[in-house]
Image: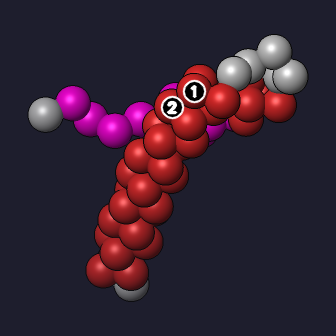
Amino acid sequence: MKKFDYTKAMAELEEIAARVEDPSVGLGEIDAYIKRSEELVKACRAYLRGARETLDSME
């Protein structure tokens, strides 16, 4: 399984946000961007939860 890269995920989210704000982007594209951003946000949250649990277990 490929290791999750939080930094790349955040960069992709920023890129998606910029694209969605572009008035030339069609609704179909926006729908796909929204779905992808939901996947990325879910993965980022899971990553951060795991990092928090790791830190909590070290205390």
Residue 5 is a magenta residue: yes
Let me know if residue 18 appears in the view. Answer: yes
Say whether marks 1 and 2 touch (CB < 8 Å).
yes
The total of numbered circles placed on residues is 2
Q: Residue at x 42, y 56 (%)?
A: 42
Badge 1 marks a residue whose secondary structure is helix
Residue drawn at (59%, 24%) of the image: 29
Q: Quadrant of the N terminus?
A: top left
Q: Nearer the viewer, residue 23 or 53?
A: 23
Q: Which residues are magenta?
A: 2-14
Q: Give the colour scheme of this rendering.
A: secondary structure
The residue shown at (30%, 80%) is 57
What amino acid is at disc 2? Answer: Ala
Q: Is residue 14 above or below residue 45?
A: above
Q: Is residue 9 magenta?
A: yes
Instruction: Classify mark 2: helix, strand or loop.
Output: helix
Few, some or many C-alpha atoms within 10 Å of disc 2 (few <14, some 14-19, many ≥20)? few
Position of 43 relative to 2 (above/below) = below
- Residue carrying label 2: 32
> Mark 1 sits on what residue?
28
The amino acid beneath tag 1 is Gly
Residue 2's spot in the image, x, y percent?
A: 21, 30
Q: Using the rendered image of the protein, determine whether residue 40 is visible from the camera's viewpoint.
A: no
